[in-house]
Image (cartoon, rainbow, N blue to C red):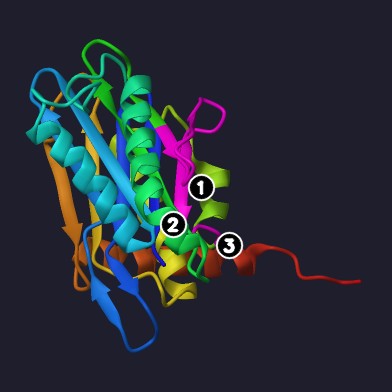
Amino acid sequence: MTYCVALRLERGLVFAADTRTNAGVDNIAQYRKLHFWRDPGKRVLVLLTAGNLAITQSVVSVLNEQLNNRDEHVGDTLFDAPTMYRAARVVGDAVRDVRKIDGPALESSKAGFGASFILGGQIGDERPRLFQVYAEGNFIEATDDTPFFQIGEHKYGKPILDRVADSRMRLGEAAKLILLSFDSTLRSNLSVGMPIDLLLYERDSLDVRRQRRIEHDDEYFRNLSSAWSDALRQAFAKIDEFKG
């Protein structure tokens, strides 16, 4: 399993993904699930992946092959799509292409065709946009009312996002919120594990300037987790106990 989350803000976008994959308690590995493409000054696209690793790696490979063979490729690539909506279509079509090849075999087994994606970025003067792409290749877009998407093992990290996420947040605030969401998930689910890949995209920069891998011994994350635990205990202690 995995956990990925992205938040769309007025100031830009923030993305994060863990790196753990497992096929049983004795078969744990580490793979990058945050991918990005950039054409500085023109576009930045970021893709988070969750689900069957073979499927998600195939989808990323299809997208890269399209870029490597743009002269022969018929249709849009991530670097030719005129809008983020069309870029989401490119990703959805790549998912469908992989499903045509691997879908029948997977769906005849217990595994099934399980994969999901979050695509975000900015193309030209268009405002940054964020999409969740499903295993069927269709997708939905984040709005001001629902400015974040999660894929993978999301239930433990969702409550704090529901209470705090706001599209008017600063990028650093959003990164703090997302890391707290990860802290809750890491404490409750062993299938999600560090390190965490984090990327902050500043609106209209049209480049990737702020990315970081949060390792097990990262001082900021360790202090964040400790401070959050202390704050929760203090808040709990201040609430009147049940008298009924």
- Residue 58 in the image, given as x and y percentages of width and height: 26, 52
Left or right, residue 81 beside residue 164? left
The answer to whether any part of residue 176 appears in the image is no
Q: Nearer the viewer, mark 3 or mark 1?
A: 1
Q: Outermost residue, top direction?
A: 125
Distance from the alpha carbon under mark 2 to that under mark 3: 18 Å
Q: What label does residue 72 carry, if any?
A: none
- Quarter of the image where one finds residue 79: top left
Read off the residue under disc 3.
Answer: 235
Crowd class of label 3 (few under 14; some 14 to 19; many from 20; radius 10 Å): few
Within the magenta stretch, is there residue 144?
yes
Distance from the alpha carbon under mark 3 to that under mark 1: 18 Å
Q: Are marks 1 and 2 in contact (CB under 8 Å)?
A: yes
Crowd class of label 2 (few under 14; some 14 to 19; many from 20; radius 10 Å): many
Which residue is depicted at the point 37% across and 27% down?
89
Residue type pointed to by label 1:
Leu
The foreground one among 110 and 211 is 110
Residue type pointed to by label 3:
Ala
Within the magenta stretch, is there residue 143?
yes
Which residue is depicted at the point 30% across and 28% down?
12
Look at the image and give the residue range highlighted in magenta: 131-155
- Quarter of the image where one finds residue 44: top left
Left or right, residue 28 beside residue 100? left
Which residue is depicted at the point 32% across and 47% down?
48
Q: What label does residue 181 carry, if any?
A: 2
Q: Outermost residue, right direction?
A: 244
Distance from the alpha carbon under mark 1 to that under mark 2: 7 Å
- Residue 73 in the image, given as x and y percentages of width and height: 16, 26
Q: Is residue 87 above or below residue 240?
A: above
Read off the residue under disc 1.
Answer: 161
